[in-house]
Image (cartoon, coloured by chain):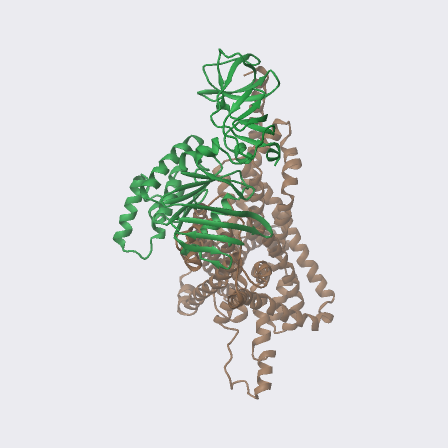
Chain colours: A brown, B green
């Protein structure tokens, strides 16, 4: 070792120590910040330690069986139909060529942009007794209201249908990614061993994709549990509506929190399922070599069949409801686009933007904290915060409102007592608490995006930059940021759209007289002013298309050899 | 027709691009053939035509006396009774070694499946690994499982696509020889694709050298080296240089390093300007020789040096010399020629 080498490594050693020293104070701040976002879950789980026996006896006697039965029925129904609607089209568009298959490949994702409560009310407006379909039917046949049978949209079955139609894309996405990821070779091998196309699917492709499909299914089930708008609108008593009713109807926040904790238990099960399957995926890697996928061209009748199978979910999950909305919007937009609407739009957009920006900044801090340190507590906290996405908005609202309302009340009491001054609801009545709740739920989105981007920048690259004499800050500014720019924008957009669509937490936590697009849509629909709800609803759907486009772009780029 | 595989005037183009052109050959039962060529020459495409992954534009593929492919007739892959091993093995990651091997053995009695499984496990020495999953195996073990899986249903023909490419270079030749004896023992007709000559020499009864989608020569390793039919094959197989020469009579060519005797194709008349292929083993080092050449380059090969030599009249030659003859650069050393197989081409043939 030459003297120069030696002195350089000695210097870098010093530097490293110095860096750690500087870092630990920052680290403490970040740990406190991270702990802050864990409050809601801790509060909700903590509620279980305060028994409320009387009310539970009452709940068990009356509504609890309903909540459990309906929630389970929703899970089973939505799970089954999203598998059906997700896996088969994913296989067809990956392996075969048929009319429109190139477009269907991404168009099948479009229902994702449709929040469940919006599709629910658009179907209701069209298919319930007073809607155009049944009216025309009556006019054509001369029947009266009770002369005929028509499926009741506002029912458990209807809720299952609505949720399946907008949630199946999760299964589709993961199944398709997995089918694409399986090198075509593995299917070719099975052909040389005597499998025909259906055998190859059944014995090789499907088992290989199973972990991915389970990941997608767990996401669907978590979303199903989290849904409030659809079940509320359809009058189905599920856990989320029960939490609302207990809080606002029975005015019992403790039991609402305890119901939330039970709901959380379900979520944990699906989360566990999801994480375990993701780990399995790592072993299901077939090959590093990819030959281009040559899609088999289907012939007349089977091509038509494949087209119908892939087109139907798109038709019922997006095209039909969107066109109902479009039609209503056209008939009402001249009145709907008043000053109130623009205030609504401004509220929603600025709320979404501020939240997205905050989420991005916090995510950057947390992810960098993880990159530069190997402390277990850091990793654990970041992982824990990323679970927020799985927690239903209702549960987060409960977990946020309880501690802040408590704090506000104590503060108010104290100030009134000693200074004869009332602070009122200092925090819990403001946008702060709403944004905080959004962050608890959606930080995961920005953390995951930023983390994925930063992981692609190898640590060696930092080391190269350091040997070139760059400081931490200039490495971030001149190397990381330019490479990650696209991903940062993605993180911003994804959170932005999620906030725009969010309903239950907003409904509970928004300040008095403060409305957003989602809340207004829901209110109008609940007041049976369906046509008027179309303009804000359509605005949400259009915003929702943005992430769909981004997702479909990123998966088609993800596999080498796949055009 | 007694050949296990018969290819007749096969042509393939994909999306308007000609991949394979007018290929014909036959391979007898229990024969082992190698398709050898640089990457992009079409050798893997040819293998895929035989397997049935590509549909032909022209020509025929016969497997065990049955027509498998011709234009407008295409026997599905799964009905061709072939086994195939892919370049990186592509084991089913969700199945154990045992499950992988018996994958193709459906519709058989359990006892017969067990019998065949045990046989293959023993043949490929996989006893310790039967319950493992692919990600727990080394590259060599994965390769053996892939071979066992392909051979399990006793395919009429076994197709191997660069089966050694993912393995350590030191292992390849040894494995090629081992595999050869296993295949001969099991009596399987095999076609293997490789870009590595030494693998091909170690494995094959017969080798097809391919270039630009054409089959350039279908011959034994010995003949490919010593009697290449085209300058392409001469260049591709082994090492060597072309030097200028002139035909003196029907058995002799005059060159700058002396007259060389050998077989001369009869269409080469006297006085014709030709190029003669000089292999490194044609030039021997001889300290007593009066003819000398200067050492201009040397590459150590273990047992030998490959010297690049410059003769007095400015010709560059290569010579393989036992490595205890360690001569410094630019030193003149004595050489003599000993050419058993005269390989000559006309100037026009060289330029192609």
Q: How many marks?
A: 0
* Residue B151 shown left or right of residue B39 in the figure: left
Residue situated furthest left in the rendering: B111
Q: Could you tell me residue A340's position as x and y percent?
A: 71, 65
Q: Could you tell me residue B91's position as x and y percent?
A: 41, 46
Vertical relation: A239 (above or below) B342: below
Q: Could you tell me residue B60's position as x and y percent?
A: 48, 53
Comparing A155 with A258, the one in front is: A155
Residue situated furthest bottom in the rendering: A142
Instruction: Tell me if I can see residue B93 in this picture.
Output: no
Q: Quadrant of residue A334?
A: bottom right
| Quadrant into which the N terminus of chain A falls | top right
Q: Residue at x 33, y 55 (%)?
A: B106
Vertical relation: A401 (above or below) A306: above
Comparing B161 with A165, the one in front is: B161
Instruction: Tell me if I can see residue A60 in this picture.
Output: yes
Q: Could you tell me residue B90's position as x and y percent?
A: 43, 46
Comparing A414 with B58, the one in front is: B58
Vertical relation: B116 (above or below) B297: below
């Amino acid at each position: 070792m030459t003297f120069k080498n030696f002195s350089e490594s000695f210097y870098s050693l010093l530097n490293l120590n110095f860096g750690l020293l500087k870092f630990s104070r920052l680290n403490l701040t970040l740990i406190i910040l991270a702990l802050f976002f864990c409050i809601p879950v801790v509060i909700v789980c903590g509620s279980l330690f305060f028994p409320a026996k009387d009310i539970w006896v009452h709940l068990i006697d009356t509504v609890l069986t309903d909540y459990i039965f309906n929630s389970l029925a929703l899970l089973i129904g939505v799970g089954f139909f999203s598998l059906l609607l997700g896996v088969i089209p994913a296989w067809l568009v990956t392996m075969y060529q048929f009319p429109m298959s190139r477009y269907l490949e991404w168009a099948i994702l479009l229902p994702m942009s449709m929040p469940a409560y919006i599709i629910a009310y658009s179907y209701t407006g069209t298919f319930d007794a007073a809607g155009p379909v049944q009216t025309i039917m009556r006019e054509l046949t001369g029947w009266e209201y009770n002369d005929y049978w028509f499926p009741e949209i506002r029912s458990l079955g209807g809720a299952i249908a609505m949720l399946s139609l907008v949630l199946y894309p999760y299964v589709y996405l993961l199944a398709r990614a997995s089918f694409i990821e399986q090198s075509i070779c593995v299917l070719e091998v099975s052909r040389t061993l005597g499998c025909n196309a259906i055998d190859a699917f059944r014995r090789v492709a499907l088992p290989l994709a199973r972990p991915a499909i389970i990941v997608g299914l767990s996401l669907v089930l978590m979303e199903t549990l989290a849904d409030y708008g659809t079940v509320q609108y359809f009058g189905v008593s599920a856990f989320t509506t029960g939490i609302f009713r207990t809080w606002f109807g029975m005015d019992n926040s403790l039991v609402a929190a305890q119901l939330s904790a039970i709901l959380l238990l379900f979520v944990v099960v699906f989360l566990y399922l999801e994480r375990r399957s993701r780990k399995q995926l790592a072993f299901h890697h077939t090959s590093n070599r990819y030959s281009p996928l040559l899609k088999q061209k289907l012939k007349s009748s089977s091509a038509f069949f494949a087209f119908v199978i892939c087109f139907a979910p798109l038709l019922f999950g997006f095209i039909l409801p969107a066109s109902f909305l479009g039609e209503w919007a056209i008939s009402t937009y001249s009145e709907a686009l008043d000053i109130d609407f623009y205030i609504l739009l401004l509220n929603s957009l600025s709320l979404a933007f501020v939240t997205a920006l905050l989420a991005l900044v916090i995510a950057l801090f947390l992810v960098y904290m993880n990159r530069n340190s190997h402390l277990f507590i850091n990793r654990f906290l970041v992982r824990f915060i990323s679970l927020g996405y799985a927690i239903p908005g209702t549960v987060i609202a409960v977990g946020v409102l309880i501690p802040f309302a408590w704090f506000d009340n104590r503060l108010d009491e104290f100030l009134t007592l000693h200074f004869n001054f009332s602070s009122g609801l200092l925090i819990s009545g403001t946008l702060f608490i709403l944004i905080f709740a959004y962050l608890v739920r959606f930080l995961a989105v920005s953390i995951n995006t930023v983390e994925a981007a930063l992981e692609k920048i190898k640590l060696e690259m930092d080391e190269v930059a350091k040997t070139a004499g760059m400081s931490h800050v200039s490495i971030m500014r001149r190397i990381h940021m330019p490479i990650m720019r696209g991903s940062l924008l993605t993180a911003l957009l994804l959170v932005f759209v999620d906030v725009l669509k969010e309903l239950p937490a907003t409904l509970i936590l928004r300040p008095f007289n403060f409305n957003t697009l989602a809340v207004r849509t829901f209110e109008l629909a609940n007041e049976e002013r369906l046509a008027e709800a179309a303009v804000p609803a359509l605005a949400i759907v259009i915003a929702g298309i943005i992430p769909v486009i981004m997702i479909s772009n990123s998966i088609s780029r993800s596999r080498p050899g796949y055009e | 027709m007694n050949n296990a595989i018969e290819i007749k005037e096969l042509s393939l183009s994909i999306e308007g691009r000609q991949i394979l052109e007018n290929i014909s050959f036959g391979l007898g039962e229990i024969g082992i053939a190698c398709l050898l060529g640089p990457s992009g020459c079409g050798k893997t495409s040819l293998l895929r035509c035989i397997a049935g992954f590509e549909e032909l534009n022209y020509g025929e593929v016969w497997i065990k006396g049955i027509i498998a492919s011709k234009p407008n007739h295409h026997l599905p892959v799964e009905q061709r009774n072939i086994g195939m091993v892919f370049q990186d093995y592509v084991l089913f990651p969700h199945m154990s070694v045992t499950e992988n091997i018996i994958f193709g053995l459906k519709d058989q009695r359990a006892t017969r499946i067990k019998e065949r499984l045990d046989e293959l496990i023993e043949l490929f020495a996989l006893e310790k690994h039967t319950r493992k999953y692919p990600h727990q195996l080394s590259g060599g073990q994965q390769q053996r499982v892939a071979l066992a899986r392909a051979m399990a249903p006793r395919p009429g023909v076994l197709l191997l696509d660069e089966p050694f490419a993912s393995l350590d270079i030191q292992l390849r030749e040894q494995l090629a020889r081992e595999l050869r004896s296993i295949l001969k023992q099991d009596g399987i007709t095999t076609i293997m694709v490789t870009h590595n000559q030494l693998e091909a020499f170690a494995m094959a009864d017969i080798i097809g050298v391919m270039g630009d989608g054409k089959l350039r020569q279908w011959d034994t390793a010995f003949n490919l080296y010593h009697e290449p039919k085209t300058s392409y094959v001469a260049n591709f197989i082994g090492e060597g240089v072309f030097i200028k020469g002139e035909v003196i009579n029907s058995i002799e060519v005059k060159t700058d390093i002396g007259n060389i005797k050998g077989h001369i194709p009869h269409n080469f008349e006297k006085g014709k300007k030709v190029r003669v292929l000089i292999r490194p083993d044609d030039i021997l080092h001889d300290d007593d020789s009066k003819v000398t050449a200067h050492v201009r380059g040397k590459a150590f090969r273990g047992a030998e040096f490959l010297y690049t030599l410059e003769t007095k009249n400015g010709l560059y030659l290569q010579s393989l010399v036992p490595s205890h003859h360690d001569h410094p650069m630019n030193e003149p050393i004595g050489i003599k020629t000993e050419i058993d197989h005269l390989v000559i081409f006309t100037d026009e043939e060289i330029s192609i």
